[in-house]
DNA sequence: TGTACATCAGTGAACGCGCGTTCACTGATGTAC
DNA sequence: TGTACATCAGTGAACGCGCGTTCACTGATGTAC
């Protein structure tokens, strides 16, 4: 019962996508190539027609994550011109992204992803930096628009915005998705806004 | 060349401590019982004189982490009476703790720790909640002292304080410890303070 | 204080399972003529 | 439009390594008398 033959291009996306999904509910150590293959109706060894190793599959997953993060930044930029609105929109989108791909925050932290090899650690670092750079740029934009305090450090603010989502994402995961991510983001945004906004009460 | 015989009590602490240290530079999947044993001068099978399984060793590590987190809260409470001072002191201590035990933030997120079994996930959840509960209590204290805005949600603020450290800890790790954790904490504290303080401007 | 015995931490060899990876083979797909 | 061939995705059996775990044995430690 051989699976339908599809191009390597398509299979690569399917494999990375399936891996990302499945990493939402288990760790990389727990995720075998056999699991991934089964998910898309292939035999384990078929993976090797498209990737050279399990490591290469993980690299593809990281690449996918990086693209989705940056997509969100772009979408938020398209949505509004006001920097504070853009930041808020980005927050909402990232909450949505985490809900749809619970694996993302965990992968960025994962012992396995980060420790297994230095090259991968560098890859993750690059992704995170690229994302933070875009966010910091939004903050600076707000400073030029005079809606964000001019005296604060844009990089610090960008990292703090990430700090709204990240610990909340853990709690959400730990609680079996009971914790209300969106509500926390809403409330924390209020605090963030109070901290960075240049319009004092 | 048999190792000196020590009591199970002592060995348990040595094993958990060694594991925690070593997890700073590698993932749980990469950390073998053989590695741990070697670190403290034992043979792999000797671990089984003190723990029933690798899982049990990890449980001991989590227990250790939980105690260290709560120790910091207590120390900060002893240090000052002012709630904002206590929160700030706690932030400083947690930065210090992360620097000394880089494994901590990563373990709390680790795919492996969280996914391998549900019981452990529950353990981590308990630890995190206990910690956040104490921090939220400090926030409420500040509200009673009128130094923190009365209208904000204490749990949200507590989680945001964690959000100052956590993403920064990742960046610190990804950058090969180049990123200046303490300086970020300092700057982010300024933002946090502006957000929660009841004394406007 | 000395002796006898039970307990218990440490040892090293061996087992066995899971899983990443390899390999020879198959048959569908697409291209050249 | 039909045929011949090269390419390439999919298969399943087998391999082999790493590592958690077991087990019979040793010898030090502490306690009972």
Image: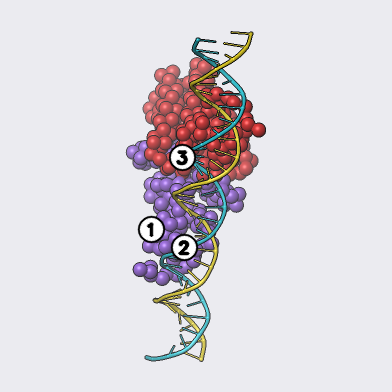
Chain colours: A purple, B red, C yellow, D cyan
Q: Residue at x 60, y 49 (%)?
A: A118
Q: Position of residue B27 (x, y in %)?
A: 54, 43
Q: Spatial distance from mark 2 to mark 3, Cα to Cα?
A: 28 Å
Which one is nearer the viewer's eye here, B74 or B165? Answer: B74
Circle 3: element type: helix
Labels 2, 3: one chain: no
Q: Position of residue D32 (x, y in %)?
A: 49, 12
Q: Which residue is mark 3?
A: B113
Which one is nearer the viewer's eye here, B194 or B125? Answer: B125
Crowding around mark 3 (Cα neighbors within 10 Å: few <14, some 14 to 19, many 20+) is: many
Circle 2: element type: helix
Labels 3, 1: one chain: no
For this view, does A13 lie left or right of residue D16?
A: left
Q: Which residue is mark 2?
A: A45
Q: Which residue is mark 1?
A: A39
The residue lying furthest to the left in this view is A178
Q: Residue at x 44, y 18 (%)?
A: B145
Q: Chain of mark 1?
A: A
Crowding around mark 2 (Cα neighbors within 10 Å: few <14, some 14 to 19, many 20+) is: few
Q: Residue at x 62, y 30 (%)?
A: B3
């Amino acid at each position: 019962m051989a699976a339908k033959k599809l191009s390597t291009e398509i299979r690569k996306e399917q494999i990375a996508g399936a891996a990302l999904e499945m990493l939402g509910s288990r760790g990389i150590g727990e995720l075998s190539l056999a699991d991934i293959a089964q998910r898309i109706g292939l035999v384990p060894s078929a993976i090797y027609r498209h990737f050279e190793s399990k490591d290469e599959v993980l690299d593809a997953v990281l690449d996918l994550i990086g693209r989705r993060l940056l997509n969100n930044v772009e979408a938020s930029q398209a949505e509004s011109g006001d920097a504070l609105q853009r930041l808020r929109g980005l927050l909402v989108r990232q909450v949505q992204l985490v809900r749809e791909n619970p694996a993302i925050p965990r992968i960025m932290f994962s012992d396995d992803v980060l420790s297994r090899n230095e090259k991968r650690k560098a890859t993750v670092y690059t992704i995170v930096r690229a994302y933070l750079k875009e966010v910091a740029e939004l903050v600076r934009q707000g400073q030029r628009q005079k809606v964000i305090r001019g005296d604060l450090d844009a990089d610090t603010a960008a990292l703090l915005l990430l700090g709204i989502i990240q610990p909340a994402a853990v709690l959400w995961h730990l609680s079996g998705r009971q914790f209300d991510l969106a509500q926390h983001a809403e409330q924390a945004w209020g605090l963030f806004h109070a901290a960075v906004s240049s319009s004092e009460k």
